[in-house]
Amino acid sequence: MSRWDDVTVSYEYRVTFSETDGLGFVHHANAAVWFERGRELYFRRFGVPASELYRRGWYLALRHLNVRYDNFVGYDDELTVRCALTKLGRVACDFHYRVDNRTTGKLAIRGHTNMVAVEAEVVGQLPKLGRIRWDRQPFEARLVDVDEFFDASAGAWRATRWEADEPEPVKPAP
């Protein structure tokens, strides 16, 4: 039993041949699918199945997806995929993921998604920015510290930032 079992969701998985590339390693796109499966299991386990959210017209749209590939994953490797809720706001929430390769004993993939609530007023029309409308209280008690989740020192896990902190200075032409 893991110290994370009460606040996270995990599932075991064996890599199939169809998930690999020509060299026998897992294609990078599979991580996003494994993360989605983890999120759906998370909501189902803690009382808000995704199907219920959709039935009510409440959706969580993917705003950011960050994946860090730390070690190769190959055909027939046995994995544990774990999903944790790390931030819960009124409009958005963050999930972090870790994929541990049980075959090699190494942390293989780390990931993060930022999900934003959207609502469809009329089925078939584009949704608009919404609010997280399910009971948040049970989820707030399950928030996980990101660095602890990755067994890292404080501040070691930072999602990749694609924009520069400050604009690059413009150099005058010679």
Image (cartoon, rainbow, N blue to C red):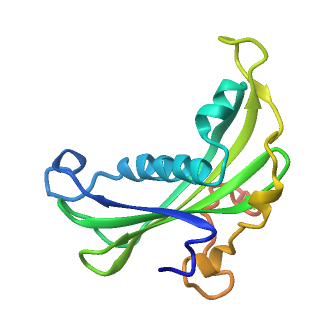
Q: Is residue 14 visible?
A: yes
The residue positioned 73% from the left and 52% from the top of the image is 93
149 horizontally vs 144: left or right: left
The residue positioned 64% from the left and 60% from the top of the image is 161
Q: Is residue 174 visible?
A: no
Quarter of the rendering occupied by the C terminus: bottom right
Q: Nearer the viewer, residue 162 or 167?
A: 162
147 horizontally vs 93: left or right: left
Query: Looking at the picture, does residue 59 appear above or below residue 44?
Result: above
Q: How many marks?
A: 0
The residue positioned 82% from the left and 39% from the top of the image is 133
Horizontal and vertical percent for residue 12? 35, 62
110 horizontally vs 169: left or right: left
Q: Nearer the viewer, residue 168 or 2?
A: 2
The residue positioned 20% from the left and 50% from the top of the image is 21
Horizontal and vertical percent for residue 45? 58, 53
Horizontal and vertical percent for residue 168? 71, 60
Query: Looking at the picture, does residue 3 appear above or below residue 28?
Result: below
